[in-house]
């Protein structure tokens, strides 16, 4: 195939993609037209020449990963997935942004073949791409040999001005440069326009110098020149030391004179002028049609992709024969099946008094020996959150086998990079920071929950009882806030045994993230509850920690450090039940019958006790119940003083019980 023909057919393909994009947005009467039109030539170069992919096996191990960080341009991605032969039909394109379609408003992982990450919130995709690149570096270090490389794919991320402005991109790219992720190629769609107007209204920095300072190699091109795109991409792909940034200067809304180059092109308003563009592009009047020449070209291109796939398969099979132990380990990673962690954890003896962050550290060391797919990261708090994997070094350019990721004080990047690692599906990522700083990474946690990613978060310093650091470091609303995120399990264990159960629950879960909420202060071992009940009870979300011995009069519910006080009071009352509820989300997944065995509807007198915002507990105590909680910011004082001030003591709980009893009499 001559360069001249390739250039012409790819330009024809770019124009065909523009037609499909306009048709999708016109049919939906909704969508983001401008960026999708401006990226047409970049799409043609990538999908028609540069990327390695297998349309009928979209999760092929050696595929290049393409992340559309500028997820509002989803119509662009769907058009190219269709042309490339993925299971995205013209019917799917017609259903763009409609209920139950494979082509939602922003790309969603697991819904559309060929979509690597759920993107839309700007900048998240850049962090995801960094995580995918980390995963690829680790896989190559684990499994490639000097005689045979089976993991040398690229991670390509399409980002725009908005992605670059979001702080998460700066955090993530700083790490990409530090870690020398040479397999990462960012293509920056530099069209100089944001939703509110020209980019110059909100930015005057030199992006090229910024990225060079991070440690990137940077090249600039005309983003509408297909030959230049291909040439520069090949140069970027040869890098062995630095991540790459390709600054592609494009025109937003390219081709529609009434809107191109302006913020008016961002949304669907330009569709009113689309009819004028179709004949200029040589497109048929029929909507949702692909020129014969373009269809024929991509049919042949798919055959070339299959040949590349077959050649890799031959190489892979030879590698399997030569390195059977590595092949076995890879199959385990790919299947995501690991031996279950024993519930008894016989080698881990509980301590009489221990902070749950310390108990968690001991559990992690136990399970990390059993499961080498676990990798741990922290936002400069390994020493406080206690989640460094012992016996392993930090991940770095010189040591990609390291199982610890030092993110520095970059919670948001940590969250999005953990998601990228989880999207790749080989390693199980763990990230840690103080609970109060979970707010910095909340957007990434939300995306993990939405995409059903099995990320594990360790949030320590779990309440105002962290004490003298004061209200800036004392979480109040964070527990309730995390519990509001759908599909996120939030577990707050009360002692070492419950911490073991919490870890078991987190490791067993594969359909979403789990947050472990852990104490800094020591908590007593709750020996009045059988150890197996504590471990198993956490996994179901709630359990009866102390059962009444006479007619049930009242129920006390508690989690974490407050369970000890509920149990102390419970000992004095034969008609009182104490329920430990470390995870509301797991409790809600029980059947109605299972829930009513723990919280009988007939007993409406209930008190909840937790050193956090009261709101979530009203679901369980009802209008006749009470919540002893913390609903104001704390202050700098000792844990004991704070506990007394907020009434988080057995004495205060007993006073309330006595008052309630007198009111009934």
Image (cartoon, rainbow, N blue to C red):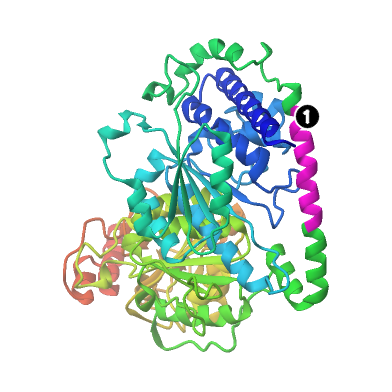
Decide if residue 159 is on the left or right side of residue 472: right
Visible in this render: residue 596?
A: no
Secondary structure beneath dot 1 equals: helix
Is residue 299 in the magenta section?
Answer: yes
Q: Which residue is mark 1?
A: 296
Which residue occupies the foreground of this view, 37 or 585?
37
- Horizontal and vertical percent for residue 126? 46, 50
Which residue is at a point 56% across and 18% down the rendered structure image? 26
Picture quarter with the C terminus: bottom left
Residue 35 vs 260, above or below: the answer is below
Which residue occupies the foreground of this view, 530 or 510?
510
Disc tally is: 1
- Horizontal and vertical percent for residue 73? 51, 33
Visible in this render: residue 430?
A: yes
Q: Which residues are magenta?
A: 295-311
Picture quarter with the N terminus: top right
Which residue occupies the foreground of this view, 654 or 346?
346
Binning the other alpha carbons within 10 Å of mark 1 as few (below 14), some (14 to 19) or many (20 upward) gives few
């Amino acid at each position: 195939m001559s360069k001249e023909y390739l250039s012409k057919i790819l330009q024809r393909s770019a124009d065909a993609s523009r037609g499909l994009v306009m048709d999708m947005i016109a049919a939906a009467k909704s969508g983001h037209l401008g960026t999708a039109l401006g990226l047409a030539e970049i799409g043609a170069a990538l999908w028609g020449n540069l990327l390695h992919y297998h349309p009928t096996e979209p999760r092929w191990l050696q595929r290049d990963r393409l992340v559309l960080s500028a997820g509002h341009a989803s119509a662009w991605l769907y058009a190219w997935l269709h042309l490339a032969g993925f299971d995205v039909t013209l019917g799917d394109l017609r259903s763009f942004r409609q209920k139950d379609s494979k082509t939602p408003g922003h790309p969603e992982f697991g819904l559309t073949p060929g979509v690597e990450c759920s993107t839309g919130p700007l900048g998240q995709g850049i962090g995801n791409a960094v995580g995918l690149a980390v995963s690829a570096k680790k896989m190559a270090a684990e499994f490639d040999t000097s005689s045979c490389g089976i993991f040398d794919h690229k991670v390509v991320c399409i980002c725009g001005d908005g992605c670059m402005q979001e702080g998460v991109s700066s955090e993530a790219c700083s790490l990409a440069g530090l870690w020398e992720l040479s397999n990462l190629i960012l293509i920056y769609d530099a069209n100089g326009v944001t939703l509110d107007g020209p980019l110059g209204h909100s930015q005057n920095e030199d992006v090229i110098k910024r990225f060079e300072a991070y440690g990137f190699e940077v090249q600039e091109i005309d983003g509408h020149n297909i030959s230049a795109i291909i040439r520069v991409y090949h140069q970027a792909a040869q890098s062995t030391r630095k991540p790459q940034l390709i600054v592609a200067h494009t025109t937003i809304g390219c081709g529609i004179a009434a809107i191109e180059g302006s913020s008016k092109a961002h949304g669907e308003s330009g569709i009113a002028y689309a009819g004028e563009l179709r004949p200029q592009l040589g497109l048929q009047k029929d909507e949702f049609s692909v020129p014969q020449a373009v269809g024929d070209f991509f049919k042949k291109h798919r055959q070339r992709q299959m040949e590349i796939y077959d050649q890799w398969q031959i190489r892979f099979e030879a590698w399997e024969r030569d390195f059977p132990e590595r092949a076995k380990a890879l199959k385990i990673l790919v299947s995501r099946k690991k031996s279950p962690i024993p519930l008894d954890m016989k080698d881990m003896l509980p301590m009489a008094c221990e902070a749950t962050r310390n108990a968690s550290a001991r559990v992690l060391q136990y399970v990390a020996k059993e499961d080498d797919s676990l990798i741990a990261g922290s936002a400069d708090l390994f020493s406080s959150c206690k989640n460094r994997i012992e016996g392993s070094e930090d991940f770095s350019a010189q040591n990609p086998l390291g199982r610890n990721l030092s993110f520095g004080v970059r919670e948001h990047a940590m969250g999005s990079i953990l998601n990228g690692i989880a999207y790749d599906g080989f390693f199980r990522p763990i990230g840690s920071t103080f609970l109060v700083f979970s707010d910095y990474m909340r957007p990434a946690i939300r995306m993990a929950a939405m995409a059903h990613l099995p990320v594990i978060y360790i949030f320590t310093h779990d309440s105002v009882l962290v004490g003298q650091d004061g209200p800036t470091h004392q979480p109040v609303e964070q527990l309730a806030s995390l519990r509001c995120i759908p599909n996120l399990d939030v577990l707050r264990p009360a002692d070492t045994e419950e911490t073991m159960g919490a870890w078991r629950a987190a490791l067993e879960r594969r359909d979403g993230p789990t947050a472990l909420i852990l104490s800094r202060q020591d908590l007593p071992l709750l020996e009045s509850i059988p150890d197996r009940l504590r471990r198993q009870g956490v996994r179901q979300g709630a359990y009866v920690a102390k059962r009444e011995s006479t007619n049930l009069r009242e129920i006390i519910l508690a989690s974490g450090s407050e369970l000890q006080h509920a149990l102390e009071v419970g000992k004095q009352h034969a008609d009182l039940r104490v329920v430990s509820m470390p995870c509301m989300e797991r409790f809600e997944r029980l059947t109605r019958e299972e829930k009513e065995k723990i919280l009988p509807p007939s007993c409406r007198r209930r008190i909840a006790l937790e050193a956090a915002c009261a709101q979530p507990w009203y679901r369980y105590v009802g209008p006749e119940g009470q919540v002893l909680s913390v609903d104001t910011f704390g202050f700098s004082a000792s844990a004991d003083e704070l506990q007394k001030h907020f009434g988080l003591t057995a004495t205060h709980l007993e006073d309330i019980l006595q008052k309630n009893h007198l009111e009934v009499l």
